[in-house]
Image (cartoon, grey):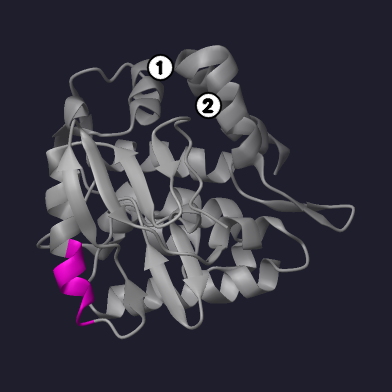
Amino acid sequence: MDVISLDEGKVIMKENMVLKHSNFQEVEALKKAYEKSKNLKNVVVPEIYDFRDDTIYMQRCYGDNLELLLRNAKTHSEGVKHVNYLLNYLLSNGFYWCDFAPRNILFNNGKYMIFDFERGLAENVVDWRLYFINNVYEEYGAFLLPEERLFTIDDIFNVNDLTLIDVESISSKRVKKILKLFGFTNKVPLFVYVFTVKMIVINEEPYINNGEIVFPLLELEDFVKNYGRDKYAEKIVGGYYARIRSL
């Protein structure tokens, strides 16, 4: 299995090499992660062979893609075990990978191979919950049932900080679209930003239907492609308040 890319054509798989259209910032992040991973006994970061014409030439690794394990009913529990183990291991070792997502992880013979460093590694992490909110919980929560997670939504999203942050400093375009619906286009209180991410997480939360696990994130990804981020923002807000009214 291979890493799942949401951007068609961005990643090309060769027999012994991976070609990824990217930038020098990711090259630098990969180099830093590669060096830091030498201190991690069972984590592999691919080696870079070259960077030219906006393309990274890197080592190809093989293994089971953790998102595909999670999406398969027969291997779901195995995927949960791997994701939780790796997440706890990285956190315990201060390796704050900003692209942590099951789709970016392969497992083979006791080794976890981690890819995608467009956002790099978080440095000087003071509040690990904000690291989680900014980088991890959305895709982590989108493929694990609530009872399977190391950290609940309440553990992570209980933030009441009134500090104002620049909306433009937020990397997620989808989050910014939702904030715009709420009237925040310049500055936004930190707790409102956290609440916005929480709404997305709740809309993407897996559930059991007729004995099968349903993953709303997959449908929402298609929705964004078909209807755009404005309609996506409306759907997220509407879905959240519909759920609140039903409780």
Residue at the extreme front: 15
Q: Please report the bounds of the magenta region as a residue range.
A: 33-39
User: How many labels were placed on the picture?
Assistant: 2
Q: Residues within 10 Å of mark 2 (few under 14, many from 20)?
A: some
Q: CA distance from mark 1 to mark 2?
A: 9 Å
Answer left or right for 149 relative to 49: right
Helix, strand or loop at mark 1? helix
Q: Are marks 1 and 2 in contact (CB under 8 Å)?
A: yes
Give the main secondary structure, helix, strand or loop, of the magenta stretch: helix
Answer left or right for 28 relative to 153: left
* Residue 241 in sight: no
Q: Which of the two labelled residues, at mark 1 and mark 2, occupies the earlier sequence position?
A: 1
Helix, strand or loop at mark 2? helix
Please state the horizontal and vertical placement of residue 228, each as a whole percent of the image.
50, 15
Please state the horizontal and vertical placement of residue 75, each as a whole percent of the image.
71, 68
Which picture quadrant has residue 220? top right
Q: Amino acid at mark 2?
A: Val
List the residue tagged with mark 1. 181
Q: Amino acid at mark 1?
A: Leu
List the residue tagged with mark 2. 237
Task: Verify whether residue 38 appears in magenta.
Answer: yes
Q: Is residue 109 above or below residue 196?
A: below
- Residue at the location (13% across, 62% down)? 32
Please state the horizontal and vertical placement of residue 11, each as a whole percent of the image.
40, 39
- Residue at the location (65% across, 33% down)? 219
Front residue of this view, candidates 163 and 100: 100
Res 222 label = none
Answer left or right for 11 relative to 234: left
- Residue at the location (44% across, 30% down)? 9
